[in-house]
Image (cartoon, rainbow, N blue to C red):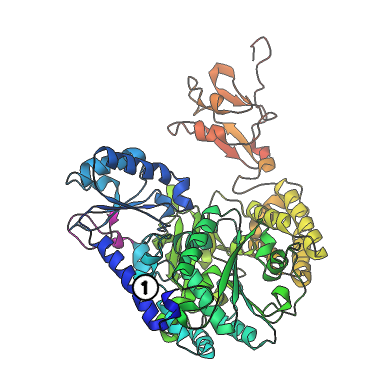
Amino acid sequence: MKESAVKSPQETFERIQERALAEWDALSNSPKPRITIGTATCGRAAGALEVLKTFKEELAEKRVDAIITEVGCMGHCYAEPLVVITKPGLPPICYGYVTPGIAARLISDYILGNDPCPEFALGALEENELIPTIFDQPRFQYEKRILLARCGDIDPEDINQYIANGGYAALLKALGMAPQDIIEDITRSGLRGRGGAGFPTGDKWQICRDAPGTARYVICNADEGDPGAFMDRAILESDPHSVIEGMIIAGYAVGAAKGYIYVRIEYPLAVARVDTALRQSAELGLLGDDIMGHGFGFEIEVMRGSGAFVCGEETALIASLEGRRGWPWHRPPFPATEGLKNQPTLINNVKTLASVPPIIDRGAEWFANIGTPASKGTAVFALAGKVLNTGLIEIPMGTTLRKLIFEVGGGIPNGRKFKAVQIGGPSGGCLPESLLDLPIDFDSLTEAGAMMGSGGMVILDEDNCMVDTARYFLDFTRKESCGKCTFCRLGTAQMLDILEDITRGEGNPGDIALLEELAADIKGGALCGLGKTAPNPILTTLRYFHEEYEAHIAEKRCPAKVCPELTAFYILPVKCERSCDACVGSCPVEAIFSGKKGIKVIDQEKCVKCGSCVDACPPQYSAVIRISPVSELPPSEPRPPDKNGKD
C-alpha cells in the first residue's frame, strides 16, 4: 500500500521530499568530481553521445571515480555539446563545443590535474577567481529563467532531482485550495496561452469548469511543428515533470480526471522521457487514483501524432486523438465546452502548463509583476537563423527585439547586416530593422502584423531575399494545409503560384494587388488558424519590403541575388588566379572551364546556381560574384572549348 493511502497529503509529500533532498544533498556535496552532459536532441545532433561515451571509457580506464549525469538542453545550442564539470571546492565550469578529444583532455588536465582548460570553457557558473563567470555574458544578464530554470541542471529521468529543486510543491499547495481559488489565481496572474493565440488562460479554465458535461479532459498540446521552433521539445526532454505537474493542477481546477499529452512522433526522446516521468510520478503516488491521499485522481496518457502541422490546431488535434482525420471543425462549439468525446476539454500548450506550478507556488502577484501590463510573465524563444548565439532564450515580456537579437543573441555573424526577423512561425510575420525597438508582447507584435506564435524566431540578414522568404513559408503552409477549406486549399496554392512567378522574373504589375486580395479572402474564409494566418509572411513582406517585390516584377532583379532565375554567377577576369582550379573542382555539373589565358569561365547554360564556386573561391581572390539581373552579364561571355580543346 502506498504511503499516500494512510497519511495526509502534507505528511506524504514531506516523506517523499525528504528522500529527494537527501539524495540531492549527497550529489551536490559529493567528494567526487561531477560531470553533467547535455544529451537532449540538440546535444545529440552535435555529438553529445560520443562525448558521453568518451568520458565513461576514459574515467574507467584511468580508474577515476566520478559522477556522470545526463541532463537536458542548457539553451546554448550554438555551443553543443555542452559539459559542466564540478570539482569539490571549486565552481562548476561550463565547456562548449566539446569533442571526444577535448573530453579526454578535460579528464587528464582538469579532473586529474589542476588546469581548468580555460581555452575550452564558456565560463564558470558561480562567482570565483579561477575563471570568468558565464553570467558576465549579456545572455544571462537579460534572461529570466522560469520555465527553463531546471533545464540543463537536473536529470530529467530522475524525479527526485525535480522534487529536490521545488518540484510538486505547487501540486501539494493546490490540493489544499478550492478549485475555484486556483482558477482565480491563474486569472489574476495574467497568464495568456503560450501556444500562439494568447487567450487568457484563467478564462479558458473557467469556461471549461462551468461547462455542463459528464466528464472533463485536459490535453497538453505538444504538437510543435513550426520551422525553427523547438521550445516545447526541449522542455519535455529537459524538465518533463513541470508539464505533468501543471496538467495535474489544471485537472484538479477544472474537474478533470483524465489527461493526454499529444506529442508528434518525430520527438522520440521527448516521448521516452515523458513516459519515464509519468511512471515515476505514479510510483510515488503523485499521479493516479488517489494523489497523495487527497482523494483526487488523475491519469495521463501519451498520444503520438504523425506529424501533421494542422494537428497543432486544437480541434484538428481532438479529431486526431479520437482516431479521425486531423481536420478542424467550425467553432463554436469551442473545445472548452464541447471537445474530446463531446465533453468539456481544456487544451493548453506545453509552456502554458509549465507556467502553472511556479504561479501557484510563488503567487499570482509575483508572476503579474513580470512583463508588461497586458502580457505577463516571460517568453521562451528558439532563436535560429543568421544570429551568433542560436538556442533557447527566456526573457521577460516587453524586452525589445533589438536587445534579444543583438545583446542576448550576440548579433549577426560574419559582419553581415540585419535585415528582418521572422517571428511566430511560418504563419508569423517578417519585421524590418525599423521595428527592432518594438517590445516583444502579444499586442505589439499583432499590431505590427506578426504574432507571438509558439516562440520560433528566425533571423535574416542582407543575403536573404524577402520575396523568396515569403515563398518559402507559404510553401510550407500550403503543403501542411489539411485541404478542408476551399480558401486555404486553393487560395494558398494560387498565392504560391504568383510568388513563384515573381521569383522567376515572370511577375506582372497586377500581382501585388492580387496577392493582397487573396490574402484578405483567405484570412476571412479559412476555418482554422493555419489558414487565417498563412498570408502573414506575404502581407508583412509587402508592407515592409515592398521595393523588393517591385524590383522582381518591374526590373526582373533580385536585390539579394538569391532567386536563381534572376541571378547569374560570373568570374571576374581581373581577379581570377589562372593557376587555381578551386571553382572547377567544386562545380557539381562541370559548368566551369578554362577560357583564354587560363582564366576560368562559367557556362551559363549548364550552371545550376548552387553557389559552390563562390564558397570554393579563395578569399584572397574573391573572383566569383553573383549578378542580378542576368542582363548584367558581359555580352561576349566566352564559350566552352570545343572537342579539340580550342577556344
Q: Quadrant of residue 598?
A: top right
- Answer above or below: position of 155 versus 352: above
Taking depth in this image into account, of 292 and 553 the one nearest to the observer is 292
Taking depth in this image into account, of 298 and 367 the one nearest to the observer is 298
Residue found at x 68% / y 28%:
606
Q: Overall secondary structure of the magenta stretch? A: loop
The percent position of residue 601, horizontal first and vertical second, equals 60, 25
Which quadrant does the N terminus fall into? bottom left
Q: Which residue is mark 1?
A: 16
Q: Which residues are magenta?
A: 123-137
Dot 1 falls on a residue whose secondary structure is helix
Residue found at x 58% / y 36%:
611
As for residue 226 lying within the magenta part, the answer is: no
- Check disc 1 and give the amino acid type: Ile
- Answer above or below: position of 74 versus 638: below
Q: Is residue 465 left or right of residue 512?
A: left
